[in-house]
Image (cartoon, helix red, strand yellow):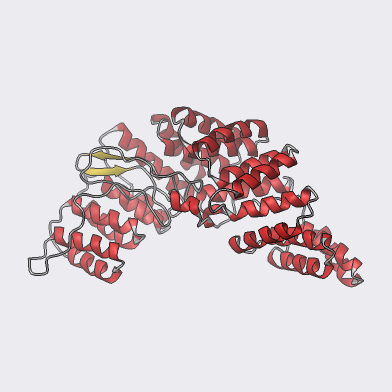
Amino acid sequence: MNVLLARAIERNGSAESNQTVARGGETLLGSVLKRKKWKRTGILWILMSAFTGVSPGQARVRGKHALVTGALTAGAATVLRVTPPAQAVNESAPVSPESLANAIESSLAQGRVDKARDALRQLLARDQLDPDILLRVGIQLAQHGFYAEAEQSFARCARENPDITEAPYNLALALFAQQKFPEALKALEGTPYKSEAEGAALLYLRGKIENALGKTKEAEHDLAEAFSKAPQEENYALDLGLFYLQQRTYRQADEIFERGARLNPASAFLALGLSLAQSLDGRFQECLKNLDHLLKLEPESSSGYLLRAYALYRLGRMDEAEKAADRGLGNPNPTPYLYYLHADLLLSLQSRDFNRIVDELAIASRGIPKCSFCDLARSVAHERMGNNPAAIADLESAVETTPDFAEAWKRLSGLYKVAGRGDDAARALDTFQKIETHKESGETETLRNLFIQMLTGSNAPAP
């Protein structure tokens, strides 16, 4: 059974992404005036997205500025409200920098992008701007996804206030969001810091940028150093653990996630990372134990049930795997991957409920782009229904989408032969035999790819 665990759940535009925050890199968000940590308003399993980066973290306010060590999402961010709230500009009064900042905020809130950009141009044309205003405006722009404009505000602040840590830090994040990785790394050069916590935050961000640049050795050093300085910081554990998952050093990932989870027992992020590391290392019983904890924290997490169903399948507990997948489907707006997995498990259990199987695969196909695994499962259902022409069409679609899909070519050869299409059967069999066999099992590799992409929020194949 080839379980489809190969596409990124960052496409999960479902309730999970509505009620939680995608990890997007570091948040460019913070509070200029509040002197306290901000709390997460949600949990989501896509641990990194817009910036390729991190989970929603904690903003620590230092002085009048917020040094942000958390994460911004691809579409929605958890933020501390910048106070005071934006007020409409009094057209009859002189336009002050504060009024222009308020105009930017209110225009963004109303979706009036051109007006916000015009107010930004006016603001940046002024002399002697308060760094609080520049940070606040940059944060608002970044929150709404206008990273290039946020870059302008942060760059101005960094240029005029070289002693403020938050300015180059947030500038690096805005550049990171635009995938300007060399520029982001340069922005951090010589950044001052006044405490060990700020130093750790800078190491952490630098490590993430180095990882994006493929500087593996440097990235590991800086991420590990940041974690060693502040192991209680959830993000530091998450990203170092993720780094080791990407490097396929699952035991090291396990150790980092386990230590982070001990210090953050309410973190569903770390519970998922730990469960994933154990699953990829073949320790499915331990994975299931940690998933019990994860699902207590987030009982409606379809991703948690997806991993649980897979672990049970690998242990040969097919009935329990089907029940776990079915339970996940009972939650609001489940991920499309659960529809696929449940349908595939029903086929493995020789279910005759073909209508449900075909319907679930249709839902999965709508939510998963170019789902060749869905085509393969659908072909099995159609063949069992006695509809060989439809089964052949399904497999032809699968190999068109994924030309090196060995199992699809093998099944297609057999169906061509039954249909009396000898030449096509021979060609399909020859293609199957030429496809390189990978060392890792299909299920393990596809599981790894799915969750690595889910953790990074990336559309690119996992390394």
Q: Is residue 382 visible?
A: yes
Exactly how many numbered labels are in the figure? 0
The residue depicted at 56 percent of the width and 48 percent of the height is 331
46 to 115, vertically: above or below: above
Residue farthest to the left?
93
Q: Is residue 6 left or right of residue 264?
A: right
Q: Residue at x 40, y 40 (%)?
A: 204
Q: Position of residue 344 (x, y in %)?
A: 72, 52
Kindly indicate the quadrant of the structure image that contains residue 123: bottom left
| Residue plotted at (71% across, 61% down) | 358
Is any atom of residue 213 visible in this view?
no
**Where does residue 380 sit, x and y in percent of width and height?**
79, 59
Relative to 28, is 434 on the left or the right? right
Q: Position of residue 365 (x, y in %)?
A: 64, 62
Q: Nearer the viewer, residue 89 or 385?
A: 385
Residue nearest the observer in this picture, 116 or 192: 116
| Residue closest to the eye, 295 or 208 | 295
Residue 65, horizontal then vertical, whole percent: 23, 44
Residue under the point 32% across and 34% down = 197
